[in-house]
Amino acid sequence: MKITIVIPNYNGKHFMEPCLASLGRQTYKDFEILVVDNASTDGSIEYLKEHYPDIRIIALDQNYGFSKAVNVGIRHSSAPYVILLNNDTTVDEHFVDEMRKAIEQSPRIFSVSSKMIQMYHPELIDSAGDLYTLPGWGVCRGVGRPVSNYSEADEIFSACAGASIYRRRVFRKIGYFDENHFAYLEDIDIGYRAKIYGYRNMYCPSAIVFHVGSGTSGSKYNAFKVKLSARNNIYVNYKNMPLPFLVLNFMPLLLGYLVKYAFFLRIGWGKEYKEGVSEGLRTMKAQKKVPFRLRHLHCYIRIELELIRHTFSYARDWFTRKIYKK
């Protein structure tokens, strides 16, 4: 088997039929499907056993979150490649084949992100991969842009784990998704780690996915999501930046947190954001840092330059959108 498709699930029974039906229409057939269920209570497992008896299911004893669920799936795969796919998606019939062809272009490619399109607004992009910036903001590239944009393959900071393919053997070298994250920013974290080790993360515009978005959490912003994302943002920077780079980036990071706090304060989630940052600062030293190695210095420098470039790119895009709206 060339590919294992890992679908993490938590009370997503209503999403499973369209998702699995789209996988059944793939032109490329050399893959298996593995559903890792986070102790759903909506009858997801029973539904899958009845309607999809050939699909492998791993039932966890409680909701461990996204990171552990996909780690379990990755560790139970023996295929060279693993596709992580959210349950609230449907995929184009060429999706798996396009993902495979993209990652096979170079052994230095760790992950490839698909072109995710908004399910209920198919004229708009949902994600064209992730970028990361000096203020510590993760940027969902292309979100809300016309679907005609981002039509060229490109290198990105990290793949969006909602619909991406990964080279399985690399996990043994750089580590798996950080289970302390539970959910949110775990894909930026592992993409960051891969780049430190010299691997690349790419974007494939011909691998098309339609995505509902927030299918498990239920909304773009909620107390759980805001608090957890704020905490995990502290973890991402602390774990992946050696001390000299943390010092170098201290001011833009501080400014980034202050701007984010002001934003969430304005929309009613300031308390949750502050609690998340406080928890992150309080618990960050318990997190496992990427060990600094001198041979990776050129990778750190390349990443720093990429953070600078992405910051200016994001600023330019933000101002362009504001002007366009006027």
Image (tube, rainbow, N blue to C red):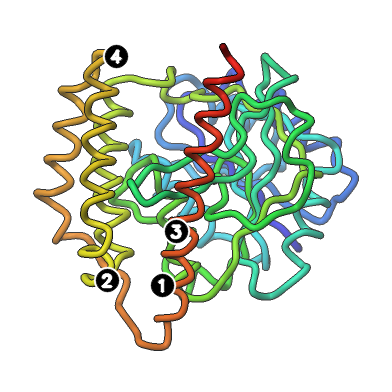
The amino acid sitting under disc 4 is Ile
The quarter in which the N terminus is drawn is bottom right
Q: Residue furthest right?
A: 27
Q: Which of the labelled discs sits on residue 73, or is there none?
A: none
| Percent position of residue 282, x then y | 9, 49
Residue that mark 3 sits on: 190
Q: Is residue 141 left or right of residue 103?
A: left
Residue that mark 2 sits on: 242
Asked which secondary structure carries label 2, the reply is: loop
- For marks 2 and 3, give the CA distance: 16 Å
Q: Earlier in the sequence, mark 3 or mark 1?
A: 3
Q: Quadrant location of residue 57?
A: top right
Residue that mark 4 sits on: 267
Q: Residue furthest bottom?
A: 295
The amino acid sitting under disc 2 is Pro
The quarter in which the C terminus is drawn is top right
Residue at image x 66%, y 27%?
A: 145
Asked which secondary structure carries label 1, the reply is: helix
- Within 10 Å of disc 3 (Cα), the crowding (few <14, some 14-19, many 20+) is many
Which mark is in front, 2 or 3?
2
In the image, residue 253 above or below residue 75: above
Residue that mark 1 sits on: 300
